[in-house]
């Protein structure tokens, strides 16, 4: 390709498209014509992939023009379908690390730059070895998928699904997976070794299909990361590796509260743990963070007897859940089933029957057997919703049985709308706790006490 008016060329000229920089040593040589004409013959294949080619050597513009106008039979290159650039002093070649000082030429370097201007692929060949357009197109196809492509991958193959490939021994970033702790509808939790800080962590790997964008995860996790309370599982950070959003959390070595209840939790222990849970929730509410899916499976009790609330990593900021006028709900992030607990099914599982628009989300989210009446009606969770869920959890801690025994989701949702549900359920526990539980389970959210008051009353009941 001969341009009658040679002009300076900049990377910004190719912004928004893929660009292939093809460095080669010299015009009028043996190997260079073979590879440049091979790339030229495949230019249509590159263009269909929104990729442009640019050849670069130390030769002058005049020598490029002579080479392009000389027939191949006379040692020239002949017609070429992409431009050649002149880099006589090796400025560009040095910048890309392909300049051979003693020969004053560039070696055979090839660089793929994506539409955002980011270098995605680089390879250098010996001066005596030409490059294959087929291999370069294969790599370009792989990069354009945005996925993980194994050895010998072709466009006819599928990419590796990192969600399915996660297993003990695999390294994600600087985390080496030790074991799978559990899996829920929206994500999986792994015990992992942080090779950088040399400590155990819990990795919540969020399923990509659940979230509209990584920013949604970041926003919600930033809200939860503000929490610093001994009864809330600490969030260390939010990262992304191999396209998977990760929430890095404190590794809690303990037993799910749901399992302790199944194994018969003592009354005194139940009240002691309930006081700790109330303290953790109160701390969250003071930071305007709502849990929205509190239940025994989302609480771990350490070997030292400390209760820690999990899954605040996907909780919503109270401010984010309300519009400027305090009414309509904003787009929310679904709450993940606790991966540390055993598998939960049916009405105890976290569900997401909501739909989202650009600025709001409506529908049912949470665990049916532990949600508040307003959540069951499709409204977003609030601090008062957490109080109701905690009330249901507390009854289960004190009695050993789930407060709402309905197995059918339809029957359970209908039961939640009963005006006298709170006073009825409170009859399941001893008299000392009835008044508190009746208030916590009030149908009207405005009638439920704040968690700070709940914690104080639990302390008083424990001391009585």
Image (cartoon, rainbow, N blue to C red):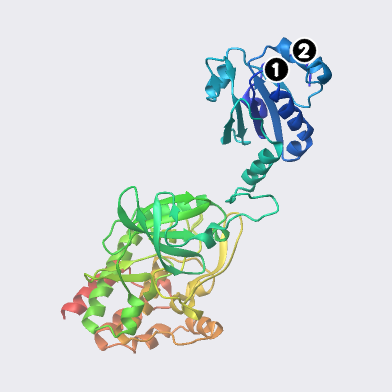
Local secondary structure at mark 1: loop
Q: Nearer the viewer, residue 288 or 192?
A: 192
**Would you name the residue on which mark 2 appears?**
66
Q: Tell me whether the residue at label 2 lies in contact with that at label 1, contact meaning CB atoms closer than 8 angstroms.
A: yes
In the picture, residue 391 is in which quadrant?
A: bottom left
Residue 403 placed where, x, y %? 39, 84
Marking on residue 27: 1
Residue 438 placed where, x, y %? 35, 81
Q: Is residue 91 left or right of residue 45?
A: left
Q: Is residue 3 left or right of residue 287?
A: right
* Residue appearing at x 34%, y 84% in the figure: 262
Extreme residue in the top direction? 62
Q: Nearer the viewer, residue 138 or 409?
A: 138
Q: Does residue 453 appear anywhere in the picture?
A: no
Question: Does 89 sit above or below residue 228?
Answer: above
Which image quarter holds the C terminus? bottom left
Which image quarter holds the N terminus? top right
* Residue appearing at x 39%, y 78% in the figure: 442
Residue 312 placed where, x, y %? 39, 62
Residue 368 placed where, x, y %? 49, 77
* Residue appearing at x 70%, y 29% in the figure: 53
Local secondary structure at mark 2: helix
């Amino acid at each position: 390709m001969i341009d009658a008016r040679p002009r300076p060329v900049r990377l910004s000229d190719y912004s928004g498209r893929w660009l292939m920089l093809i460095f080669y040593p010299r015009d009028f040589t043996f190997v260079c014509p073979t590879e440049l004409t091979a790339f030229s013959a495949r230019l249509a294949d590159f263009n269909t992939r929104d990729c442009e080619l640019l050849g670069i050597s130390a030769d002058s513009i005049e020598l490029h023009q002579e080479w392009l106008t000389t027939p191949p039979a006379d040692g020239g290159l002949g017609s070429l379908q992409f431009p050649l650039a002149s880099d006589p002093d090796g400025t560009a070649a040095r910048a890309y690390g392909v300049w051979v000082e003693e020969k004053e030429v560039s070696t055979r370097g090839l660089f793929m730059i994506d539409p955002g201007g980011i270098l995605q692929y680089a390879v250098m060949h010996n001066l005596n070895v030409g490059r294959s357009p087929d291999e370069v197109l294969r790599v370009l196809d792989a990069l354009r998928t945005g996925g993980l492509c194994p050895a010998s991958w072709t466009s006819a193959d599928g990419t590796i699904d990192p969600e399915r490939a996660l297993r003990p021994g695999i390294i994600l970033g600087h985390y080496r997976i030790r074991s799978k702790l559990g899996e829920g509808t929206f994500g999986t939790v792994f015990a992992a070794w942080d090779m950088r800080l040399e400590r155990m962590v819990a990795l919540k790997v969020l399923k990509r299909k659940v979230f509209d964008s990584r920013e949604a995860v970041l926003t919600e996790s930033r809200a939860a990361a503000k929490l610093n309370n001994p009864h809330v599982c600490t969030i260390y950070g939010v990262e992304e590796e191999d396209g998977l959003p990760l929430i890095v959390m404190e590794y809690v070595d303990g037993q799910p509260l749901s399992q302790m209840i199944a194994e018969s939790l003592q009354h005194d222990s139940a009240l002691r743990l309930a006081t700790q849970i109330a303290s953790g929730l109160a701390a969250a509410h003071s930071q305007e963070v709502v849990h929205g899916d509190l239940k025994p499976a989302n609480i771990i009790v350490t070997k030292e007897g400390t209760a820690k609330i999990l899954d605040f990593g996907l909780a919503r900021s109270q401010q984010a859940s309300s519009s400027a006028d305090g009414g309509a709900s904003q787009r929310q992030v679904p709450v993940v089933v606790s991966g540390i607990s055993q598998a939960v099914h049916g009405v105890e599982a976290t569900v997401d029957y909501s739909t989202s628009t650009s600025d709001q989300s409506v529908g049912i989210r949470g665990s049916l057997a532990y949600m508040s009446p307003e959540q069951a009606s499709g409204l977003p969770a609030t601090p008062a919703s957490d109080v109701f869920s905690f009330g249901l959890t507390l009854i289960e801690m004190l009695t050993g049985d789930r407060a709402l025994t309905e197995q059918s989701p339809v029957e359970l949702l209908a039961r939640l709308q009963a005006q006298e549900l709170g006073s009825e359920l409170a009859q399941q526990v001893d008299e000392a706790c009835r008044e508190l539980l009746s208030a916590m389970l009030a149908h009207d959210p405005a009638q439920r006490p704040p968690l700070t008051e709940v914690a104080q009353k639990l302390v008083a009941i424990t001391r009585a």
